[in-house]
Image (cartoon, rainbow, N blue to C red):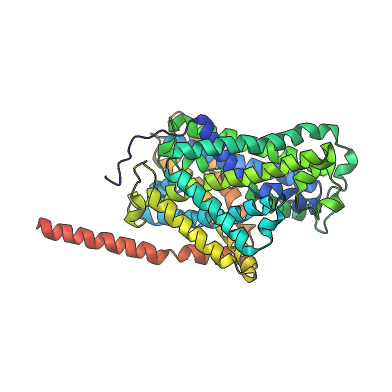
Amino acid sequence: MSVTSLPRRRKLGPWMATALVVGNMIGSGVFLLPASLAAFGSASLLAWVLTSAGALLLALVFARLGRAYPKTGGPYAYARRAFGDFVGFQTAWGYWIAVWVGNAAIAVAFVSYLGYFWPALTDTALAASGLALAAVWLLTGVNIRGVRQSGWVQLVTTVAKLLPLIGLAVAAPFFVDAGDFTPFNPSDQGTFGAVTAAAALTLWAFIGIESATVPAEDVENPERTIPRATMIGTIVSAAVYILGTVAVFAAVPRTLLTQSTAPFADAAEAMFGGWAGTAVAIGAIISAFGALNGWIMLQGQVPLAAARDGLFPRVFAKLSRWGTPAVGLVVSSVLVTALMVLNYNAGLVEQFNFVILLATLTTLIPYAYAAAAQLMLALTDREHFSGRRLATDLTIAGLAFAYALWTIAGSGYEVVYKGTLLLLAGIPVYVWLKHRDHDTTVQINKKAA
């Protein structure tokens, strides 16, 4: 089978594509965020609004690029088209690392939520690691069988995770008291500093905006479905985040909230009783499981796209009989397994958490490249951007690039420094790939002569 030909297979419809965006954004971290944000008081609500506005700018960029270029790879495909192979490789390299490293963290979070009901699961590192790896490989198998199967898992888990969060958001007005939101900024920072620090935390909740663009060739009617799924998914997620945080702030005193390990569950229990807290805890488990499924899908798609263009080892372009990038899925899950085995040693936990920050940075850089790609392509490829005013395209892309740059800078000097080294570490791989292609071209020319 040719590595560039895709067999017929059932694809992701509008609901599944939207669920992929929502499910990948509303993952494991959001259920803990209100506790982290409590230290900044109501200033964190302003941070949510600002971050949501920036996320919507990026969503507009991905929606526009997804409509113009519905090709598998998402940020990688756009960066390569606009800036060539080297920037394309950097984007694919960083994004791929970010995905499989992040999957290790989501798997750990999934097991920690299960420990809410069965503490014995987390009593020993061996049991916790074993269960986390079982979830990783179960969902790897689901994704190998086809994106449609993975899409159903994503749709069901997204609906299940949204129900308790929406329930809290709807109930919030009945429990809100003005005193719940004072003081505006209880931290020891100025208002600007507090909002900026809170925005840095809320930013992580929006990683995944691009999810519908990555498996573009596996999406039904991608020119129409991808933009809608991206925008609807981002708006729904932003609304859930803001209203959910309001609900938690209203139900749980700030002094208790800062110490909470399950803020949404605590809020639900305070509002409706113990059964509601249990329901939200179940929602958190489903949320982590669904996010793990969605991100495992993406961990095979970007290497597939790059390998088909000669920018990743060719083996990543091989497809299973179900038309899925099985090699990329398996290799990525092997790396997830290795990282979790290293994390088995409790002494590596702090290092592991820092690697997650680096992985998040390597996701933000592709976002910046995508915004810059729209700037470039809107100027040089008006055929694909017809029907839109040039000024509108350039303004959206420019603002989105500025936002991405601000968020990268907000990651901190150490993270940016080490994240840059992580990206540069891929250059020898790029050199080897180009050398391989050069040798192949020379041999072909010799035979032809």
Please determine whether, in this image, residue 438 is positioned above or below residue 214.
below
Q: Would you say residue 55 is visible in this rendering?
A: yes
Residue 285 position, x and y percent, is 65, 46
Residue 356 position, x and y percent, is 59, 59
| Quarter-of-image position of residue 280 | top right
Residue 188 in the figure: left or right of residue 131: right
| Quarter-of-image position of residue 178 | top right
Residue 59 position, x and y percent, is 56, 39
Tell me the quadrant of the picture where the N terminus can be found.
top left
- Residue at x 75%, y 55% (from the top left corner): 193
Please determine whether, in this image, residue 65 is positioned above or below residue 114.
above
Q: Would you say residue 87 is visible in this rendering?
A: no
- Residue at x 85%, y 35% (from the top left corner): 175
> Residue 262 versus residue 303: which sits nearer the camera?
262
Residue 337 position, x and y percent, is 51, 60
Residue 375 in the figure: left or right of residue 238: left
- Residue at x 56%, y 45% (from the top left corner): 208
